[in-house]
Image: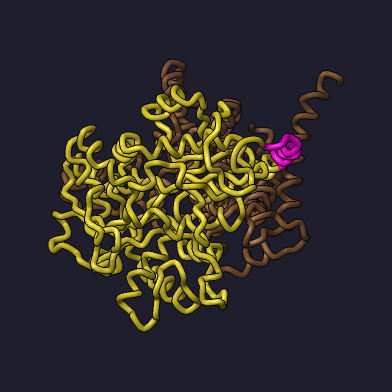
Chain colours: A yellow, B brown
C-alpha cells in the first residue's frame, strides 16, 4: 500500500524535476573525457556500511560534494529505488551482480569512461570488464569490491574437510544446514549440477534453460528438509553456527572471520566445483543530476587506501590489487585473510553473480529470467 | 461538528484511500521485464494465489498459527486475569499490572531475539533439560518456535480485556449463585465464563489480527517452512517489485479479519473493549 502511494507522490515530483534540464557531463551525448567542477551534492543508493564517515568525510572535504546515502536492504530494493522517481532522484548505486544487468537492460544506468578513473588499471583483470557490468564493450560502472560464497563448516562437528558442494545436499547433515534466503541460490545448485550431472550441459549457472532450471530447483527441493533456516542476514548465520543450530552451509568470508574471532571452531573452503561470488559496481544513473561528483566519487573509492578501509570495515575483497599493502597497514594480516593477494587461479574459480535474463546468447531466448527464479524460490520455501 | 471534520477527513484519506488503492491495484499486473505496473484489469494475481499450492499452504499456515496463538493466549490469560481481578488485593493487583505491561516497554525485536537465545541448540532450554537429564528439544527455528514467540509477545493484549470483563462482574451475581447452591466450577461455567466471553473475544481480535499481519517473528524465529502472508507481501514488494501481487495476497487477511469481526460483534466483543 505504502509502495503505491510513494510511487504516486514521486511520479509527481519527477514530472516537476524533468522540467529542469540536466547539466554537466555524460547526459547521454557520448562519454565524458574530463571531469568538471563538482555540483556540490551526490545522492547514493548503497549497501549499509558502504558510506562510512571514515572515507566519506575526506571525500566531502576535498571535493565539496556532500554525500547523501540511502541504504537498501536487498538487490531488488536497489533496482526499485533506482526506478522510483523516474531515475533522477539518485546519482549512483552500489549494485551487486544480481541487479546490475537489470539496471543496464532497464536503461536505468549509463556508460562511464574508465579512462577517467586512474586506479582502474590496478584492478583485478577479472573485474575490469566483467559481464555483470560491461555489455557490448560499454562499461556501465566501476567495480568496487567482491566476495566469494564459500562453504562454511564447523570443524568440531564435520570431521573430514568437505571438498564438494555435495555436502550441503547430504542427508547426513539433516536439520543442520543453512543457505542464504536469496533466489540466486539456484545458481549454487546449478553450479554443483554442472559437475555432478554433466549430462544436463550447464555451462553457466546463471543461464539455465527450462530443463536445467527444473533440475536445479528439484535439487533444492530435496535439500529443503535438511535446512534449519534460510538465512536472510549475515548475523542470522553467525547465530546459527555459534549456537550449534547449524554445522554446515553456504556463507561469506565475513561470517567465517566473525565466528573465528568469537572462538567458534569453523573453517571455510571453496569446493572443487568452484563457487559463486558477488561483486559490487558503482553504477551511474542514466539521469544523474550530479555526474561530476559521481566521477569524483568513483575515483575516490577506487584508490588503494579507501578500497582497503572499506574491505576491512565490511569484510570483503577490494578490486584494486594495490589495496593489499594498505590492508596490512591498517590491520595486520587482513590482506591474506580476505584473499586480496590470491593468485589468478583463485579468481578463475569464482563465477560472479549476474542477473538471469531470458536471452542467454544462443539466439533462442529460452533461458529462465529472474522473475522465474524469484517465483521458484518463493514456492520452494513454501 | 466542524471540529470533527479535519480528523474525519484525515481518517477517511488515510484508511479508506489506502484500502481502495490496495483493492484496485490487486487487479493490475507487472511487466516482467521492466517491472512497471501495467494498468490493465485482470484477475491473474488471484488465479495464481488459488492455483499455486505454495500460496494456499502459506495462507493456511498464517491463519492456523494465528488461531493457535489466540487459543493459547486465552487459556493462559483467563486464570491470570481472574486472579488479578477477583482474588488479588489492590497492592498485588498493581504489581501484577506492572508485570503484565513491563514487556511492552522493551522493543518487540529484543523480545523475539531473547526467545531465540532461549530455544536454540545451545540455549537456556536445552541447558536446563540437560541438567535434569532430559534429551535436547529441537524447537529453535520451527513453526513451534513461531507459535511460542507470538503467544508470548501478544499475551498482554489478551490479559487486559479479559481483566476488564472479569472486573465488571458484580459480586452479587456470584453470591446469588453460591446461595442457590452452585459450587465453584458450576459458577465459573454458568456465570463467570459467559460474562467474560466478550472480553475474551475482544482480546482474541488483538492476538489474531496481530499474528495475522506479522512478518518479523516468522522471519527471525521461523525455520525453513515458516513463511507467513506478510513475508510473501514483503518479498513481493521488496524483492520482485510486484506490488499488484502483494496487494492481492494482502486481501486474504483483510477478508479473514472482516469475517472474524462480524462474528466478534455478534458475541458482544465491542462492548467489552
In terms of depth relative to the viewer, which is nearer, B57 or A56? Answer: A56
Is residue A189 visible from the viewing direction of this image? yes
Query: In the image shown, does B88 or A172 lie closer to the viewer?
Result: A172
Quick check: A200 left or right of A106? left
**Residue A212, placed above or below residue B268:** below
Determine if the magenta segment contains residue A275. Answer: no
Question: Which residue does the image show at 24% across and 42% down from the upper left?
Answer: A324
Q: Quadrant of residue B17?
A: top right
The correct choice, above or below, for A375 with respect to B145 in the image is below
Quarter in which the N terminus of chain B is drawn: top right
- A13 drawn magenta: yes
Depicted A159 relative to depicted A73: above or below: below
Q: Position of residue B4 (x, y in %)?
A: 81, 22
Q: Which quadrant of the structure image shows residue B79? A: top left
The answer to whether residue B183 is seen in the rendering is no
Using residue A40 as the reference point, say whether residue A214 is left or right of it. Answer: left
Horizontal relation, residue A1 to residue B223: left or right: right
Quadrant in which residue B175 is drawn:
top right
Q: Is residue A372 left or right of residue B223?
A: right
**Residue at left offset 46%, top offset 47%:** A114
Front residue (pair A310, A28): A28
Q: Eyeballing the image, is A162 above or below A338?
A: below
In the rendered image, residue A36, in percent from the top left (x then y), is placed at 55, 33
Residue extending farthest top: B91
- Magenta range is A8-22
Q: Residue furthest bottom?
A: A199
Name the residue: 38% across, 30% down: A55
Residue at the far front: name it: A33
**What predominant SS class does the magenta segment belong to?**
helix
Amino acid at each position: 500500500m505504502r509502495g503505491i502511494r510513494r510511487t504516486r507522490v514521486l511520479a509527481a515530483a519527477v514530472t516537476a524535476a524533468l522540467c529542469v534540464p540536466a547539466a554537466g557531463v555524460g547526459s547521454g551525448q557520448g562519454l565524458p573525457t574530463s571531469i568538471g567542477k563538482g555540483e556540490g551534492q551526490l545522492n547514493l543508493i548503497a549497501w549499509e556500511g558502504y558510506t562510512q564517515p571514515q572515507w566519506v568525510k575526506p571525500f566531502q572535504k576535498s571535493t565539496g560534494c556532500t554525500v547523501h546515502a540511502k541504504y537498501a536492504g536487498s538487490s531488488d530494493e536497489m533496482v526499485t529505488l533506482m526506478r522510483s522517481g523516474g531515475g533522477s532522484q539518485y546519482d549512483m548505486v552500489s549494485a551487486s551482480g544480481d541487479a546490475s544487468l537489470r539496471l543496464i537492460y532497464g536503461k536505468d544506468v549509463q556508460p562511464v569512461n574508465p579512462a577517467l578513473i586512474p586506479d582502474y588499471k590496478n584492478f583485478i583483470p577479472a573485474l575490469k570488464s566483467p559481464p555483470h557490468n560491461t555489455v557490448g564493450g560499454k562499461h556501465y560502472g566501476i567495480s568496487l569490491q567482491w566476495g566469494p560464497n564459500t562453504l562454511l563448516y564447523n570443524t568440531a562437528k564435520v570431521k573430514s574437510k568437505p571438498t564438494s558442494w555435495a555436502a550441503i545436499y547430504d542427508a547426513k547433515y539433516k536439520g543442520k544446514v543453512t543457505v542464504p534466503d536469496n533466489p540466486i541460490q539456484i545458481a549454487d545448485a546449478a553450479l554443483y549440477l554442472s559437475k555432478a550431472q554433466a549430462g544436463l550441459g550447464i555451462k553457466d549457472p546463471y543461464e539455465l534453460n527450462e530443463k536445467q532450471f527444473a533440475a536445479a530447483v528439484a535439487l533444492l527441493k530435496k535439500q529443503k528438509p535438511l535446512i534449519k533456516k534460510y538465512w536472510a542476514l549475515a548475523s542470522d548465520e553467525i547465530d546459527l553456527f555459534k549456537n550449534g543450530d547449524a554445522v554446515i552451509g553456504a556463507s561469506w568470508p565475513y561470517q567465517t572471520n566473525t565466528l573465528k574471532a568469537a572462538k567458534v571452531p569453523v573453517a571455510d573452503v571453496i569446493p572443487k566445483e568452484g563457487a559463486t561470488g558477488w561483486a559490487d559496481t558503482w553504477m551511474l544513473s542514466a539521469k544523474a543530476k550530479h555526474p561530476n561528483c559521481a566521477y569524483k566519487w568513483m575515483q575516490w573509492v577506487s584508490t588503494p587506501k579507501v578500497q582497503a578501509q572499506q574491505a576491512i570495515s565490511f569484510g570483503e575483497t577490494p578490486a584494486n590489487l594495490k589495496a593489499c599493502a594498505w590492508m596490512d597497514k591498517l590491520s595486520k594480516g587482513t590482506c591474506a585473510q580476505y584473499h586480496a593477494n590470491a593468485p589468478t587461479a583463485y579468481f578463475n574459480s569464482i563465477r560472479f553473480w549476474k542477473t538471469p535474463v531470458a536471452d542467454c546468447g544462443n539466439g533462442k531466448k529460452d533461458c529462465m529470467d529472474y522473475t522465474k527464479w524469484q517465483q521458484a524460490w518463493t514456492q520452494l520455501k513454501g | 461538528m466542524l471540529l470533527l471534520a479535519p480528523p474525519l477527513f484525515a481518517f477517511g484519506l488515510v484508511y479508506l484511500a489506502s484500502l481502495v488503492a490496495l483493492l484496485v491495484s490487486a487487479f493490475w499486473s507487472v511487466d516482467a521485464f521492466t517491472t512497471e505496473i501495467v494498468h490493465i484489469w485482470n484477475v491473474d494475481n488471484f488465479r495464481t494465489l488459488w492455483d499455486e499450492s505454495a500460496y494456499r499452504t502459506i495462507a493456511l499456515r498464517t491463519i492456523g498459527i494465528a488461531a493457535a496463538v489466540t487459543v493459547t493466549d486465552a487459556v493462559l490469560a483467563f486464570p491470570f486475569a481472574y486472579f488479578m481481578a477477583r482474588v488479588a488485593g489492590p497492592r498485588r493487583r498493581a504489581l501484577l499490572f506492572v508485570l503484565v505491561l513491563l514487556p511492552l516497554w522493551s522493543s518487540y525485536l529484543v523480545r523475539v531475539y531473547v526467545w531465540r537465545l532461549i530455544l536454540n541448540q545451545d540455549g537456556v532450554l536445552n541447558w536446563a533439560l540437560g541438567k535434569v537429564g532430559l534429551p535436547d528439544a529441537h524447537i529453535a527455528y520451527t513453526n513451534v518456535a513461531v507459535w511460542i514467540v507470538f503467544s508470548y509477545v501478544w499475551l498482554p493484549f489478551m490479559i487486559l480485556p479479559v481483566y476488564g470483563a472479569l472486573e465488571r462482574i458484580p459480586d452479587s451475581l456470584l453470591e446469588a449463585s453460591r446461595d442457590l447452591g452452585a459450587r465453584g466450577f458450576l459458577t465459573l461455567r454458568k456465570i463467570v465464563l459467559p460474562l467474560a466471553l466478550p472480553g475474551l473475544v475482544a482480546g482474541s481480535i488483538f492476538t489474531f489480527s496481530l499474528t495475522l499481519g506479522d512478518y518479523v517473528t516468522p522471519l527471525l524465529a521461523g525455520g525453513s517452512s515458516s513463511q507467513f502472508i506478510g513475508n510473501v507481501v514483503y518479498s513481493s514488494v521488496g524483492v520482485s517489485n510486484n506490488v499488484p501481487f502483494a496487494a492481492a495476497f494482502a486481501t486474504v487477511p483483510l477478508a479473514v479479519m472482516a469475517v472474524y469481526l462480524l462474528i466478534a460483534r455478534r458475541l458482544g466483543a465491542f462492548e467489552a473493549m
